[in-house]
Amino acid sequence: MSEADNRENLKITIGVEEEFFLVDPDSRDLIADPDPAIFEACEAGIEPHKVTREVIRSQVETNTRVCASVAEAREALRETRRVVIEAAEAHGAAVLGSSTHPFAQWRELKVTAKERYARFLMTFQETIRRLVIGGMHIHAGFGNPESRIRVMTAIRRYLPAIHALSTSSPFIGGSDTGYKSYRLNLFGNLPRTNLPPPLRTRAEFEKIISEYQRMKFIETGSEIWWDVRPAHAFPTLELRICDICPRMEDAIAVTALYVSLLRWLTRQDEAGALPPEPLTEIIAENRWVAHRYGTLSFFGDTTHENARVDIDDFVGELVEKLTPDARALGCEAELRHTLTIIREGSGADRQADLYRLRRLEGDSDEEALRKVVDLVLAETREGVF
């Protein structure tokens, strides 16, 4: 492969999906049946991006255009967030960028009238009705179908750390869950979620899809909901494990980490030097540690001889390793912001800290949770206007 071909192969395109909640500004509760004009206003102003309705009517999902860099992705997120926030506020709603709502009750919410969602509701029953969660998905286009499969397998060991940085769902239904990402607990009740198996070829992946289809478990590959997967509709590797980050800058940092990792792993793949795979069971254990403890995680060490490794040390070492790739992608500062997230806390940390502070200062449980909503509403707007 020539040097020019190699540079072309290391280019990465980016697209980011974010799933937001629509909140009543007075009660701070979710709006069970939002004004359709909100979605109409979003659709009218969103191009060249896209907006879609989610399973729960109280949600709206944005999809950025295809971006050539992390800097472009930041501007695209600013544009999509601005459109949704302005549309919501023009019709009596506010926009919440966290992966669960602190106190909304799922029984009071409604499922969007759409054939696909009706089929899911018929199949999964109460699991779907309880699935009042939102996430952030990052699409990265690079390489070819075979290399994307190999890199998907290689990136599995890093998914717990990536997820820990994004955590934003410590509360559900008025309860402090003790988890930094309770969203994964809820989403894991569906089949075909969690880690992908260690695959080496595109044929292995396509065999899984064809067997599911032969047995009529799925209609398309879009119903494979792994933490990271080959996207069904695009030639991308789609990262799905992350909570939505209330702060846009945190979302961009996670994006920078993901694409820098992909570039580094692609270089290793081209050299035939991908690192040996850790046990899937240990990656899964680290995944649980990440959604339980977030930025306070101590992972099982799959690289050195230590039993456990602090996330600060793990990500710090990773950032140093990835710096040349981040520099080549123009996102070195954004990559280093991941260390700031660990030092200052994720969205989940800030929510939990505020809740406990307000309780200590005399607020009722309900008052404290309303203040948590206010915090996230404010953070969702940061850097947008």
Image (spheres, rainbow, N blue to C red):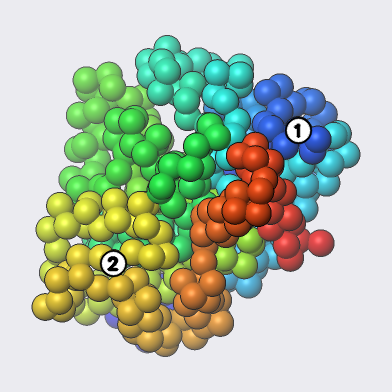
Q: Give the side of residue 356 with respect to residue 367, left or right.
A: left
Q: Position of residue 45 (x, y in %)?
A: 81, 45
Q: Position of residue 326 (x, y in %)?
A: 47, 80
Placement of the C terminus among the 4 image quadrants:
bottom right
Q: Which mark is residue 323?
A: none
Quarter occupied by residue 365: top right
Q: Whole-Å distance between the Cαs marked 1 and 2?
A: 38 Å
Q: Give the side of residue 348 with respect to residue 74, left or right.
A: left
Question: What residue is at 37 percent from the left and 57 percent from the top?
Answer: 293
Quarter occupied by residue 128: top left
Residue type highlighted by circle 2: Phe
Q: Give the side of residue 125 with respect to residue 212, left or right.
A: right
Mark 2 packing: few (<14 Cα in 10 Å), some, or many (20+)? many
Placement of the N terminus among the 4 image quadrants:
bottom left
Question: What residue is at 51 percent from the left and 59 percent from the top?
Answer: 349
Which residue does the numbered mark 1 point to in the structure image?
27
Question: What residue is at 33 percent from the left and 79 percent from the top?
Answer: 313
How many numbered discs? 2
Q: Give the side of residue 180 with respect to residue 379, left or right.
A: left
Q: Secondary structure at mark 2?
A: strand
Depicted 378 relative to depicted 339: above or below: above
Q: Position of residue 285 (x, y in %)?
A: 22, 53
Residue type highlighted by circle 1: Ser
Question: What residue is at 60 percent from the left and 49 percent from the top?
Answer: 359
Q: Nearer the viewer, residue 290 or 134?
A: 290
Whether residue 324 is visible, yes or no, is: yes
Q: Position of residue 348 (x, y in %)?
A: 52, 55
Which residue does the numbered mark 2 point to in the structure image?
298
Q: Earlier in the sequence, mark 1 or mark 2?
A: 1
Q: Nearer the viewer, residue 368 or 360?
A: 360
Kindly give the residue lying farthest to the top in the view shown: 122
